[in-house]
Image: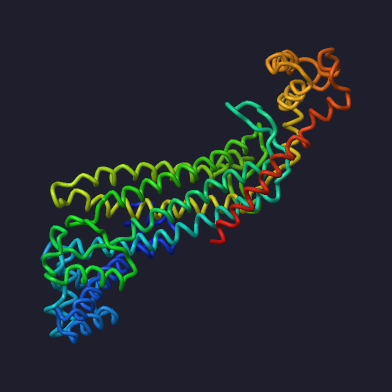
């Protein structure tokens, strides 16, 4: 780094975060949103005859013309030690005679919370798009590998066969559920207030209801129906807990890649630039799942950010400032990191290398043990008690590493051959046949997800 960059100390400033979200939380952008709220207030009040129309026009021209500089706001705040008052003063200075009407009837939280609602709405739009991109990457894999047999694992042990496509469909469905949750909570999140010092609207007199409704309509927001001096913090706590849920989904998917990329399994691997990328400074052979590990690391931090907003729900009477400072840190960081990790996870699954041959070899390595359920159910269907059929298969799979595979053991077992021919035994123990159900279910899941994503 050189120049001013050497003074950067927060990793989000130089290591994490994408440009679009960085711009969203830039100081100029945040000032611009606060000024939009001030202009909307003036325009609404002018329409109701509360302030002169020419005053509202002057205020709006000052906002639209970019006449309020961040430098001047900072200069005023240095003296006033009040961020919103500094914005209002700076706007008044460049609004001519109309400046006396800036901020008329409102309180600081009317401006900051309504500007925050604009910020959160924009953030939600970006995150919704991120989730759709990730879901589509997973759906593409689900479709391509709908019938690719892979051993299913429970407790870290071989279970019964699954298709890799179905595994991806499961992930896609979870991602789409997160998008649905966002759609459900957004109307509760994207709300502002224009209701004065304790939320009653008294400062706007007889026009209180109309002022709030008009401002929010101009800004495309809902209104908190019962605020105090601030918008209810349960709304923000719900959102940050949703971010934590998304982080949980992301880490679950990343962990699956990390486990399947283990040298001992090696069924999938992250995209890796063989020409340039380095996996280790000393072990040149390494091809580490670095993106997935990064997702896991960031996801844990996003989940940690869910706690302060829960604490912020507790206020002294109509408001205190205990929420303010931590929200300035928590919300930009949590949103930026969630966008960052979703982008990285989409990169992982868009370029994921799937080794179907390795999956088949792993199934074969199970010695047929992964197919015990198929033979057990077939024996039950032929008249055995399920418990008896289960005991036969338990006996046949003892010491799987010693002796022949399950198919040979079953063909030599009189209890099994009394019900099935050798050919039937082989068919029952064929993984490809057993994953047909997974392939068909994958198709159904994908079709439903495609319909939902189209909405």
Q: Quadrant of residue 393?
A: top right
Q: Nearer the viewer, residue 198 or 57?
A: 198
In the figure, residue 257 lies in which quadrant?
A: top right
Give the image location of residue 196, x and y in percent. Answer: 15, 63
Above or below, 297 against 111 in this view is above
Instruction: Check the image and name the residue furthest to the bottom.
Output: 54
Residue 18 in the figure: left or right of residue 81? right
Q: Nearer the viewer, residue 373 or 26?
A: 373
> Visible in this render: residue 99?
yes
Residue 108, horizontal then vertical, whole percent: 17, 63
For the residue pair 117 and 291, the one nearer the viewer reads as 117
Q: Please, is residue 285 above or below residue 89 in the view?
A: above
Which residue is located at x 75 percent, y 36 percent? 360
- For the N terminus, the image quarter is bottom left
Note whether residue 399 is visible.
no
- 199 sits to left or right of 233: left
| Residue that appears at 64% across and 34% down | 263
Residue 55 position in % (x across, y down): 17, 83
Which color scheme does this rendered protein use? rainbow
Q: How many marks?
A: 0
Quarter of image, res 77 = bottom left
């Amino acid at each position: 780094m050189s120049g001013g960059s050497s003074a950067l100390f927060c990793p989000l400033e130089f290591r994490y975060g994408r440009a679009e979200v960085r711009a969203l939380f830039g100081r100029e952008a945040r000032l611009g949103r606060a000024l939009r709220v001030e202009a909307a207030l003036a325009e609404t009040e002018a329409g109701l005859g509360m302030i002169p129309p020419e005053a509202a026009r002057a205020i709006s021209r000052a906002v639209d013309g970019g006449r309020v500089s961040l430098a001047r706001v900072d200069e005023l705040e240095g003296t006033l030690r009040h961020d919103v008052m500094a914005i209002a003063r700076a706007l008044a200075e460049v609004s001519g005679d109309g400046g006396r009407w800036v901020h008329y009837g409102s309180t600081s939280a009317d401006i900051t919370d309504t500007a925050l609602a604009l910020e959160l709405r924009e953030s939600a739009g970006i995150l919704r798009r991120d989730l759709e991109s990730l879901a589509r990457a997973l759906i593409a894999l689900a479709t391509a590998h709908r019938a690719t047999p892979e051993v299913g694992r429970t407790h870290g042990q071989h279970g019964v066969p699954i298709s890799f496509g179905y595994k991806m469909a499961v992930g896609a469905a979870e991602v789409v559920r997160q998008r649905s949750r966002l759609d459900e909570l957004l109307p509760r999140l994207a709300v502002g207030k224009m209701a004065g010092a304790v939320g009653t609207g008294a400062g706007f007199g007889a026009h209180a209801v109309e002022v709030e409704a008009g401002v929010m309509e101009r800004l495309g927001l809902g209104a908190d129906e019962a605020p105090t001096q601030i918008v209810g913090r349960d709304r923000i706590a719900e959102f940050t807990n949703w971010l934590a849920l998304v982080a949980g989904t992301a880490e679950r998917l990343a962990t699956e890649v990390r486990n399947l990329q283990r040298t001992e399994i090696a069924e999938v691997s992250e995209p890796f630039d063989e020409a340039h990328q380095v996996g280790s400074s000393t072990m040149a052979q390494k091809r580490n799942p670095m993106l997935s590990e990064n997702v896991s690391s960031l996801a844990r931090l996003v989940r940690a950010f869910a706690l302060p907003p829960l604490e912020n729900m507790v206020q002294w009477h109509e408001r205190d400032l205990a929420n303010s400072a931590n929200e300035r840190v928590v919300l930009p960081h949590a949103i930026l990191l969630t966008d960052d990790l979703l982008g990285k996870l989409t990169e992982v699954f868009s370029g994921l290398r799937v080794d179907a041959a390795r999956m088949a070899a792993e199934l074969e390595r199970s010695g047929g043990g992964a197919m015990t359920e198929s033979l057990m159910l077939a024996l039950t269907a032929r008249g055995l008690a399920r418990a008896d059929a289960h005991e036969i298969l338990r006996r046949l799979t003892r010491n799987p590493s010693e002796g022949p595979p399950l198919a040979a053991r079953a063909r030599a077992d009189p209890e099994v051959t009394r019900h099935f021919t050798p050919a039937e035994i082989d068919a029952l123990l064929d993984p490809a046949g057993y994953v047909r159900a997974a392939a068909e279910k994958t198709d159904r899941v994908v079709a439903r997800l495609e319909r939902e994503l189209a909405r």
